[in-house]
Image (spheres, grey):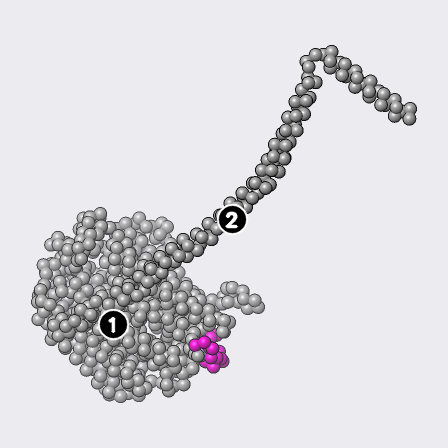
Amino acid sequence: MTTETLIWLLPLPPLLAFFLIVLFTNKNKALSHSIAVGAALLSFAGSMVVFFRAVGAEHFGEHPFTSFVNWLPTGDTFLKIGVLIDPLSAVTLFFVAWTILMIFIYSVGYHNFGQPQGDHDHKGLPPHGATVADAHGHQHTVLSVEPMYSRFFAFIGLFAFGMYTLVISDNLLTLFVGWEVMGLCSYLLIGFWFAKPSARAAGIKAFMTTRVGDVFMLLGIAFLYSATGTLTFREIFTVETLHVLATTITPVFGLSAAGLIALLLFIGTIGKSAQWPLHIWLPDAMEGPTPVSAMIHAATMVSAGVYAVLRMFPLLTADFHGHNLTPTMSVVAFIGTFTAIFAATIALAQNDIKKVLAYSTISQLGFMIAALGMGAYIAAAFHLVTHAFFKALLFLGSGSVIHGMEHGVLHTGNHHIDPQDMLNMGGLRKKMPITFWTFLIGGFALSGFPLVTAGFWSKDEILADAFAHGHWTILATLSIAALMTAFYTMRQITLTFFGEPRTKEAEHAHETPWTMTLPLAFLSVFAVGFGWVGIPEHFPGIGGLLPNWFHHFVGGTLLEHPEAVEFSPIPLIISLVVALGGLALGWLVYKDFKAGQPDPLQKPFGPLYGFLQNKWYFDEFYAFFVIQPVIWISEVFTNAMDRGFIDGVLHSFGKVALWIGDLFRNKFDKPFINEFLGDGTAAIFQKAGHELRYTQTGRIQSYLIVSASFLIVLVAVLAYLFLA
């Protein structure tokens, strides 16, 4: 099979699995998850074949794997759609295939672990239909997810199809199709436990928030097509086309056409990758099952936003000359930098194990966006790949922790305790050793632990690029965000795994099955090993021992291969200080934390702690300044527009119709139709009948006399006519 044909087939197994499960196997749990995992395995195998063929190809950046078909006729030409695997999409395909397969396998154990003879569902909740109170005292009806087991695997199959479609697309149109498929699946999976009101609200919130960004992205796609007549990447990213777009100034905004298009497309990324100010949906996405959190936060959805900016990077930098950042690049850099530190501050004060990781994801995506705003293409792509591995590891690890805690909940019967609250944990290092060690590896990779984790090499490259090009504000801000990252990561590890169990439920937690721990082991290998492919060649001591394969390979995607920044010890020292300092500080602050104690940050932070714990009150801000005004405006429009204007117009039409009806009835229908034609005709026939009735005597003699008289008259008339 040719490579191009294989690329076309990559998204099909998950899509086929979706239809098979929905239409035929939804009542068979084992068959449904077997089909889903088998489909993921097929796409994984195909992806690995494509990836290694790409790695082995000579001058792959200049001659990527590509194939297209003519789709829609547009006058004398066709709108083409096809597939493209270049160095960027090849490495993206690599991490997407690995993480998706691991998440599918993990999901089997996640949905089947800890089911005590059907008395409880897999989340450790009371039986189906029971009423329980949450932490705020609100009553909820429990819905067992057993009937929806197959439905879950169908949805994640459709999710995988969307991501594969997005990665292999050679044009913005089919990329946007995959983009929107994932948007739909995020709504379905975040709100998967729809019997829970918060889950329903979270699904709607995610869908509506990302739609805001997608509207602008669609405008950018339309603008790009009107300006170039094509949506195919290799036709857009030519020197001639980019020059025209860079030198064409839009009259209203004062930006180049390339800059405005890139900005509109980037707003789509703000929504999809949960950057400020459209970040609010991602923490609430924790309402979905943990495998969904891993897919959304690591393998697919949010990575798709950064991938889209990487893909459109030539547009972003079309009018950049290597000195001052363009207005569009400045906006991108600001959004990324601010989001990185903004989300990191919130993560400091969160106690839900998954929400800490959610805000960490927002922050790390900010690092990537900031790098792209600076023009650091390789650094952003490198951190995208390493982050996918260690963040998927951390989310799946958090799901393992939660399952271990839920086993303790089942043992004690205390369903009111929150198994996701880190303050209820402690001492799980001995109870769940595999989860502990893999989570520790992922946490150290997130923190940028020096030399041995992938996160160190990718995050250090971003800081090195900011230093090399004199972006001091970005460097300082990202360094502080990195320090906070290391601190809240060690806070999370210490509260969860170290010390003594702080609840009875933590005492009875135990390790999860191999279907959950095996994916953790595989991902932990990449959380360490993938960093080795991007070690700078001039790094002291080990630089040059391994070639900087990532830089040479992925850099071939661009028309002009980016140069590696010169090595400087300053960003290296910064990386070491913030990583080790943050980890040490987190350990010192939380190592002696006991049950019932307030958070050690609460006293020194004072009111600021509550501010951070409440997420800068952004949800309240949007509720007051956006949602309530929209509701008020809709009510005003309902009263003024709908009831006042539209109903008034309709009632006016009704009145006019009634007037015209009365006019026709009084001036035409009644005098002419009714009286003249209807009643008049009847009166004539009535009078004629009245007069003629005298001829009906009933006597035969009278009839004979009349007949004879008629014959005499007739004969006389005929004789006259004949003789004349």
How far apart are the two marked residues, 1 and 2, measured between alpha carbons? 61 Å
Mark 2: which amino acid?
Val
Above/below status of 721 relative to 366: above
Image location of residue 362, percent across then percent down: 27, 70
Above/below status of 641 relative to 381: above
Front-lying residue, 519 or 280: 280
Q: Quadrant of the N terminus?
A: bottom left
What residue appears at the point 32 percent right and 68 percent down from the top-left corner?
Answer: 278
Image location of residue 142, percent across then percent down: 22, 51
Q: In the image, is 199 to the left or to the right of 685? A: left
What residue appears at the point 32 percent right and 57 percent down from the top-left corner?
Answer: 188
Question: Between disc 1 and disc 2, whose residue precedes?
Answer: 1
Image location of residue 330, percent across then percent down: 35, 80
What residue appears at the point 74 percent right and 11 percent down from the top-left corner?
Answer: 701
Which contiguous range is marked in magenta? Answer: 234-253
Question: Dominant secondary structure of the magenta stretch?
Answer: helix
Image location of residue 215, percent across then percent down: 40, 66
What residue appears at the point 9 percent right and 69 percent down from the top-left corner?
Answer: 593
Residue 436: tell me if it is visible.
yes
Mark 1: which amino acid?
Ala
Please give the label number shown on residue 656. Answer: 2
Q: Quadrant of the C terminus?
A: top right
Report which residue position mark 1 lands on.
343
The quarter of the displayed image where residue 331 is located: bottom left
